Image: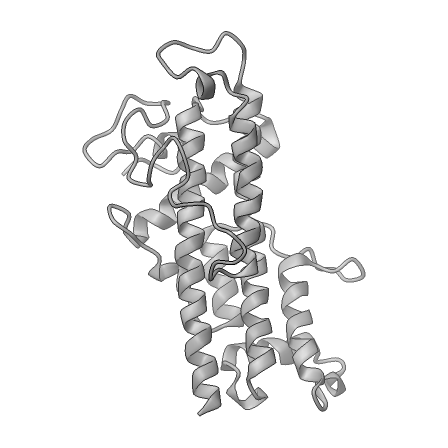
Amino acid sequence: MASLDAPCRTLARLPHGDPPPTTVRTTESPWGDPTGPASPSLHKDEYVTDALHALQVALNDVDNLIEHHPKAAEPGRGRPTTDEGPLLRSCVLLIYAAWEVYVEDSLVWVVEQLANSAAPEHLPTALRSFVCDAIRADPWQLAGEGWRRVAVAAVVTRVRGAEDEDSFGMNTAGPRQINALHAQVLGERPLDRCKWQKMPTKRVKEELASLVRIRGAIAHTGKTPGQLHLKGVRDWRSFIQRLAGHLDGHLETWVDARTAAAGE
């Protein structure tokens, strides 16, 4: 397992050995087809959350940028004749942004489902505690049906921040931060159940942490810790789409179980 202090090298890991340092995936990726998304495009009429649909729309922007890379139109050996670094770094920033927004929106979706279908006594203990702490100064907001609006508003403020408060929302969508957020609001860590073939949960979290590190390096220095290639960007795009799909499924299953129990 490559060290996370060289995040671009993490991209280069393969099921059977490592390629040379500072390269980004030169053979088949366990994340899916490196020339396209890990699964078919998601359409609004399919059974996906609005959050997952929005992520797909955001990743379409990445696809549009990739189309402008010389290797996208004429794949083959050799370096592009122009500097494509800015384009690839922009893709990484957009991929990460799509992921962070998905994490925020999906949690808001979960709480909206619970608030719309459950009585307050059926809410997860963690969510009730979180909401009570958020409105401690004015508990009357919970009177009557007001708790439904307040619960959603408290989570929105937690993930997106509030202009009139000293709250900046979720600043980093890394595995540690996501687990802490889900545990605080839901009392669960669904990210810890995300895995697929050749990608156990431990590696999923390591890869996600690497993306966060690379995004941070680009945002703060304009550079990546190693070389960034088109195939590596495509792999990140496929990884995030696949991870979001798995996390979405776990969240939907959890919501279904909670609302079914509340209806009994």
Q: Nearer the viewer, residue 259 or 136?
A: 259
- Whether residue 97 is visible here, answered yes or no, is no
Q: Residue 222 appears at what percent x and percent y?
A: 59, 26
Extreme-top residue of the structure: 81
Q: Quadrant of the N terminus?
A: top left
Q: Residue 201 appears at what percent x and percent y?
A: 31, 54
Q: Quadrant of the C terminus?
A: bottom left
- Whether residue 155 is visible here, answered yes or no, is yes
Residue drawn at (64%, 76%), measured in percent from left and top? 151
Q: Is residue 213 left or right of residue 12?
A: right
Extreme-right residue of the structure: 164
Q: Locate residue 38: give its quadrant.
A: top left
Q: Residue 155 appears at what percent x and percent y?
A: 63, 68
Q: Say if 228 sits above or below 193 in the image.
A: above
Q: Nearer the viewer, residue 198 or 64?
A: 64
Q: Nearer the viewer, residue 21 or 93?
A: 93
Q: Looking at the image, what colour scheme do you see? A: one colour
Residue drawn at (69%, 77%), measured in percent from left and top? 150
Q: Residue 73 appears at what percent x and percent y?
A: 46, 18
